[in-house]
Amino acid sequence: MNVRRDVVKYYYNPEVKYLLINQSNEKVAVYYNKNQKPFELPMIGNRPPYYCNPRYEAYYPVI
């Protein structure tokens, strides 16, 4: 019996779906600084540009 050991293992993470959503009307309650009253934020908001249009540039460290 020949068993392959170089097989990549995959796993499923349900939170990855939030990266694929552009916008949402859902709100999430956020407790900030131990306040008793939460405030609501959009579950999915505007993303910084590097999520939408990544740009890879070569850089060299300063020595």
Image: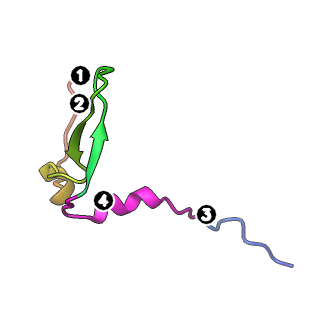
Q: Along the line of sight, which residue is nearer the eye, 2 or 36?
A: 36
Counting other residues with Cα less than 10 Å from the Cα at mark 2, is it few (<14), some (14-19), or many (20 or more)?
Answer: few
Q: Is residue 32 above or below residue 26?
A: above
Labels 1 & 2 near each other (Cβ < 8 A): yes
Marks 4 and 3: which is nearer the front?
4
Counting other residues with Cα less than 10 Å from the Cα at mark 3, is it few (<14), some (14-19), or many (20 or more)?
Answer: few
Q: Along the line of sight, which residue is nearer the eye, 60 or 7?
A: 7
Q: CA distance from mark 4 to mark 1?
A: 37 Å
The earlier-in-sequence mark between 4 and 3 is: 3
Q: Is residue 50 magenta?
A: no
15 lies left or right of 25: right
Q: Is residue 10 magenta?
A: yes
Labels 4 & 1 near each other (Cβ < 8 A): no
- Residue 19 tag number: 4
Secondary structure under the numbered disc 3 in the rendered image:
loop
Residue beneath disc 1: 63
Q: Along the line of sight, which residue is nearer the eye, 22 or 9?
A: 22
Q: CA distance from mark 3 to mark 1?
A: 39 Å
Q: Amino acid at mark 2?
A: Pro
Q: CA distance from mark 4 to mark 3?
A: 21 Å
Can you give x and y, in whole percent of width and height, for residue 2 in the image? 81, 77
- Residue 9 tag number: 3
Q: CA distance from mark 3 to mark 2?
A: 34 Å
The earlier-in-sequence mark between 3 and 1 is: 3
In the rendered image, which quarter is residue 16 located in? bottom left
Q: Is residue 35 above or below residue 15?
A: above
Can you give x and y, in whole percent of width and height, for residue 63 in the image? 23, 22
Q: Amino acid at mark 1?
A: Ile
* x 49%, y 59%: residue: 13
Residue beneath disc 2: 61
* x 20%, y 64%: residue: 22
Counting other residues with Cα less than 10 Å from the Cα at mark 4, is it few (<14), some (14-19), or many (20 or more)?
Answer: few
